[in-house]
Amino acid sequence: MKKKIAIVIPALSLSVAMLLCGCAEAEISYPLSAYTNHPVGDAIAQYLSEQDALTFPDEDMEEALSQFGVEVVSAETLRERLGDEAEAVLGEHCTYLYTEREFTTQYGDTLLSPAVYVISADENRCFTQTFTPENPDGARWDSYYVSVHDILSRQYLPAEDGGYDCIALSDFAFVRVYCTEHYIFPAGHTGSTQSEYIYTQYAPYFDDAVTPMQQNVGIREDMRLQETTIIIGGVEIGAVTLSRGRE
């Protein structure tokens, strides 16, 4: 017997998110807003949660993101808009989302800050892992198949040479967990029930790293998560390593 239940779980709390960022340079402590202010990230996650698998954007995705001023663009368009900075973004099997925001400095100047979001099906951005007990005990046990997409964001400010400099690299983990509950009935028959869990885990300042910079809040240029910890029903199942150090 199989039953599939889809559950969307909101982003993790600050304490867990900071743990997931775990770096050797843990001396920088980010405020709660660094982990919770990501409307574009939420829109991307909502779209992905409604798909059976990672798909390249269609008209539905473009419509869902257009209300946030985000458009789907080609690699050629990125080169036109970002110049040499675009090369660090480009890769195989990628979907590029682009937006521009205006920020006013303390001196009254207006800055144009582009941001690029990258959804990729490449192996260094899309991870799968299984977690199964080595020695199941009793007539019931769980196994987990985990699919993780590492969604990147790159944010820019104008450079002195007239181009753009990348000021922040962040990401969020879009996690889909298939939990299979295995049963052995008294008569020796076997059965299983499957549940699906979907949730997100964000690195700091996924949508806006410019505001904290203007407020003299210390940030790192690379704030990506190193791993995502899989927690189901308050129980830690394991961890999946993400992209940092694997490019």
Image (spheres, helix red, strand yellow):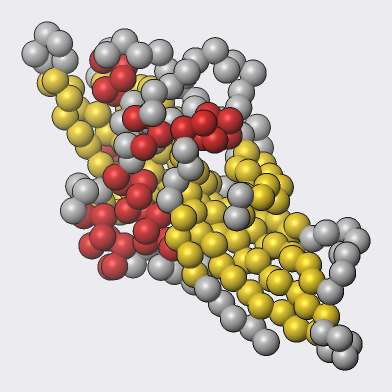
Vertical position of residue 40 compared to residue 219: above or below? below
**Depth check: 77 or 49 in front?**
49
Which corner quadrant holds the N terminus? bottom right
Vertical position of residue 170 compared to residue 174: above or below? above
Q: Residue at x 60, y 61 (%)?
A: 177
Q: Residue at x 27, y 33 (%)?
A: 114
Vertical position of residue 16 compared to residue 46: above or below? above
Q: How many marks?
A: 0
Q: Residue at x 75, y 57 (%)?
A: 131
Residue 219, percent from left and from top: 42, 18
Horizontally, is 239 left or right of 224 in the view? right
Q: Residue furthest left?
A: 108
Residue 122, percent from left and from top: 58, 53
Horizontally, is 77 left or right of 188 in the view? left
Residue 172 visible in this rendered orientation of the protein: no
Which corner quadrant holds the C terminus? top right
**Depth check: 161 or 70 in front?**
70
Question: Dividing the picture into quarters, in which one does residue 197 lie?
Answer: bottom right
Q: Residue furthest front?
A: 186
Question: Dividing the picture into quarters, in which one does residue 20 lie?
Answer: top right
Question: Dividing the picture into quarters, in which one does residue 101 lie?
Answer: top left
